[in-house]
Amino acid sequence: MDARYELRDHTADVAVAAFGPALDSVFGALGDGLSAAQCDEIPADGERFSFSLAAEGREALLFDYLDQLIYERDVRAVLPADNEVSVNPGEEWRLEASARGVPLAEVEAREVKAVTYSEMRIEEGEDGWEAYVVLDV
């Protein structure tokens, strides 16, 4: 089973739910969901970029990851797409991530202002991982 995401309505905001066999793939699917919340059709071009993060727990790492994607969007003027993530749990949670940066000039994008901790959850179940995040639009 590959990871997948779903956009869900959430009062004045939008939520992304992701499901996958591994935590890595769920993080990446949430990144793709963040992109989909901003743009209906994502062109196939763009150069890959990467970054690393560390946090005290998996929820904090997820928040920081999605927040970093918004930062990269703003600084690089790109829509991060085709997100790939490697999550390394431990005393300090770490991740290595990369995304394809689609130039914002090539897409009609809606603004996602921020990631919220509101209703955020990451859970491991019998069929893999599930996560849910609300985005401030």
Image: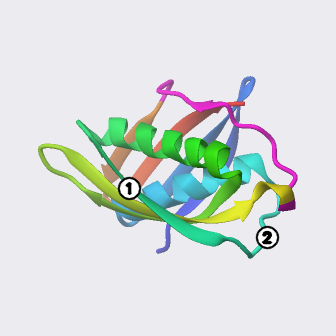
Find residue 126 and report its image quarter.
bottom left
* Disc 1 secondary structure class: strand
Q: Which residue is mark 2?
A: 43
- Residue 10 visible in the snapshot: yes
- Residue 6 visible in the snapshot: no
Which of 107/133 is in front? 107
Label at residue 19: none
Which of 86/107 is in front? 107
Image quarter of the C terminus: top right
Check if mark 2's residue and mark 1's residue have beta carbons within 8 Å.
Answer: no
Residue drawn at the location 87% of the way across and 52% of the way down = 108
Position of residue 17 measured from the top left corner of the image (x, y, whole percent): 56, 47
Q: Which residue is mark 1?
A: 129
| Tag 1: amino acid | Trp
Please check the rendered image and state whether residue 116 is part of the magenta-colored stretch, yes or no.
Answer: yes
Find residue 115 and report its image quarter.
top right
Position of residue 133 measured from the top left corner of the image (x, y, whole percent): 53, 38
Residue drawn at the location 71% of the way across and 64% of the way down = 102
Q: Taking 88 as reference, is 37 left or right?
A: right
Task: Classify 10 Å Cα crowding around label 2: few (below 14), some (14-19), many (20 and above).
Answer: few
Query: Which of label 2 and label 1 is nearer to you?
Result: 2
| Tag 2: amino acid | Pro
Q: CA distance from mark 2 to mark 1?
A: 28 Å
Magenta segment boundaries in residue numbering:
106-119
Please check the rendered image and state whether residue 56 is part of the magenta-colored stretch, yes or no.
Answer: no
Which of 65/52 is in front? 52
Position of residue 85 measured from the top left corner of the image (x, y, whole percent): 41, 63
Position of residue 44 measured from the top left corner of the image (x, y, whole percent): 74, 75
Q: Taking 67 as reference, is 46 left or right?
A: right
Residue drawn at the location 72% of the way across and 24% of the way down = 11
